[in-house]
Image (tube, rainbow, N blue to C red):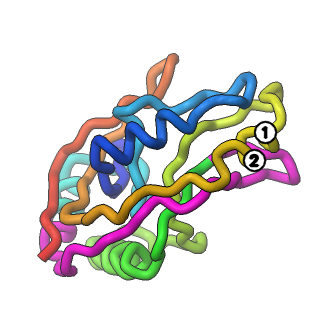
Amino acid sequence: MRLFVAIRLPRLVRERLIAAMGGISGARWQSDDQLHLTLRFIGEVDRRQAEDVHAALDAIRQPPFEIALSGVGFFDQRGRPETVWAGVAPPEPLVALHRKVDQALVRVGLEPERRAYIPHITLARLHRAAGPVGGFLEQAGNLASPLFTVERFALFESDLTEERAVYSILADYLLN
């Protein structure tokens, strides 16, 4: 099983993100069912580890919090853009929840996250032949939304198909 922990975004937020997509030739834009805010990528685990992960995530306690969409950007690899994303603000409650998720996963034997956590929502993946991102960044640079409440997070499974990744929610956890 290939797992990750993420927040499923409200429908109105996903609609705003989808409306902002476009303007980069050759980009692989995310579909509505792929839009999420990752808290922690887990990777491949067996059924027993998945059960341990579920129990650890179920024990996390944090009050609900509010965030909003806030701008767009991209991650690059050796100077070449490879992922276009939407930002969120404020980052602090997401960073705190990420830390709790990471600590819970370490307690059940998974390696700690080594990369810095940058809260974002992936909008598109870019291949080498993809067009420039400047026009998209200029057009969607002021992407924003009203505050929305994050009341839950989820354990997702990712199935990689030839066309795209298919995400399924395995378990849902209420913030309290």
What residue does disc 1 label? Answer: 135
Quadrant position of residue 160 = top left
- Kind of residue at badge 2: Glu
Tag 1, which secondary structure?
helix
- Kind of residue at badge 1: Gly
Tell me which residue sits at (20%, 62%) in the image: 152
Residue 12 vs 18, above or below: the answer is below
Tell me which residue sits at (49%, 52%) in the image: 121
Confirm or deny contact between disc 1 and disc 2 (CB under 8 A): yes
Look at the image and give the residue range highlighted in magenta.
Answer: 55-84
Q: Position of residue 134 (x, y in %)?
A: 81, 43
Quick check: is 60 in the magenta stretch? yes
What residue does disc 2 label? Answer: 138
Q: Position of residue 79 (x, y in %)?
A: 87, 52
Quadrant position of residue 165 = top left
Is residue 123 shown left or right of residue 27? Answer: left
Tell me which residue sits at (46%, 76%) in the image: 90
The foreground one among 73 and 39 is 73
Tell me which residue sits at (47%, 59%) in the image: 69
